[in-house]
Image (cartoon, helix red, strand yellow):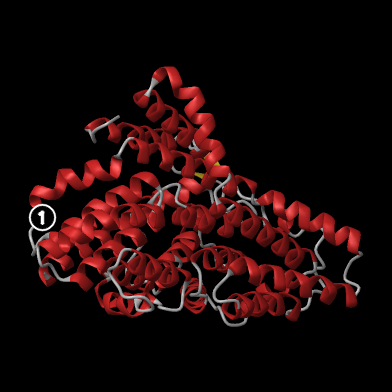
Amino acid sequence: MSEPSALSLIPPAVVLILAIFLRRPILALILGAVAGLLLLSPSEALSNFSEISLKVMQDETIGWLILVCGSFGALIALLVRTGGALAFGRAALTLAKGRRSSLLMTFALGVVIFVDDYLNALTVGETMKRVTDRFKISREMLAYVVDSTAAPICVLVPLSTWAVFFGGLLENNDIAAAGQGINVYIQAIPYMLYAWFAVILVLLVAAGVVPAIGPMRKVEVLARHGSAGAMHVGELSPGHNYSMKSLEEEFEGADKEGGKLYNFLVPLLMLIGFTVYFDIDVWMGMLATLSITVPFYLLQRLMPLAEMLDQMVDGFKTMLPAIGIVIAAFIFKEVCDQLMLPQYVVESLKPYMSAQMLPAMVFLAMAVLAFATGSSWGIFAVTIPIVMPLAYALQADIPLTIGALLSASAFGSQACFYSDSTVLAAQGSGCNLISHAITQLPYTLIAAGLAFVGFVLIA
């Protein structure tokens, strides 16, 4: 395809429709990618799929994600098996006296773990789900709170992986001088309206000021009236059942009586501390944490080394569905790039872009792209060379435009059904991915609508 066209919208539409109706995100993404490849060249679709999938698997980001997510699953397995996770649940219940306080505790924990959205999404959900279960809060509500304090919080903090990545992009594209990328990023933080609205909205929901709406209300009713062991078994729509492991199944074999709180807190605090120490490198933080946690548990004789390794392998396996979805999303994003979807969306909205409307239209265009492709960082990297020269030519407010771009990235990361942050928030919270995406969508759209109006008014 030599020129951008409306045909590039077909694959995202295929993915969204199939994901909702089939409730199998990997299959939906693969079929969407195949649809795009057939549009590009029917005779070479198979060879192109082979080439793109190999390219994705050789991508450093995918390798990093497999290692980080898999090792996090291994660490979680150790925390559960030693009884540390159960001990934390018992301790947290002394502070969380009801639904509201447990959700506010989840929100506070999400704000504290601001260094990386992956680390946030996996840690907070895994830490709090046993507490919220006690008060019959749906896993979907937990996943929404977790997801809303992942990317939206990380994007607002200049000491996160988001700030490091986007600050580097600003320097590489000559928008900021060498070494000044973070400073330019900080100037845009007040204008990252989606992130601000998303954080405020989830706080109001957690505090009970804003009620559960739409699909979220339905799953909350199911959770409240369900039995303790089966309260996460329900239906969002006829014929689409989903189930969760009960607490008894999850803790089968765990040390229920002798579990110590420090065996849960020490590894998590080390993970956060080492991640910050190694310049916000989650993989280095994870390696350092595991290298100390394993001997730490061995010295306590919590389990033999062979059993510990078996538990770690089983934990790694639990992350494979999440890893598979992200890999499929990367393949799909590559197909969308070849179809020139970003260029088509930007070109379509260019006639409506003036100096006053540019930030709002940039947010709208990039939000659509990030939602359609599931790529928040990748879309930013592709479109910043297109959008920023236009902003300079129109003499638009540069920090406001950067804020609009980053707002769109945060929206895509949270709202897209198959973005990495959404996948990991659902995984960490023990929630069905599509159920999580559908139930939180009304809230993300409200925050996005407020952000769009905000960009229009500010400009």
Which one is in front, 357 or 108? 357
Badge 1 element: loop
Which residue appears at 56% of the width and 59% of the height? 429
Q: Residue at x 36, y 56 (%)?
A: 381
Residue drawn 16% across the image and 43% down it: 348
Number of labels in the image equals: 1
At a point 23% along the width and 33% down the height, the residue shown is 3
Identify the residue under disc 1.
Answer: 353
Residue 452, image x and y in percent?
19, 61
Amino acid type at circle 1 is Met
Q: Is residue 237 visible?
A: no
Q: Quadrant of the C terminus?
A: bottom left
Could you say which is closer to the camera, residue 333 or residue 151?
Answer: 333
Residue density around tag 1, few if under 14, some if 14–19, many if 20 or more, within 10 Å: some
- To which quarter of the image does residue 268 belong? bottom right
Using residue 395 as the reference point, say whether residue 445 is left or right of it. right
Of the pair 382 and 174, the residue shown nearer to us: 174
Vertical relation: 2 (above or below) 404: above
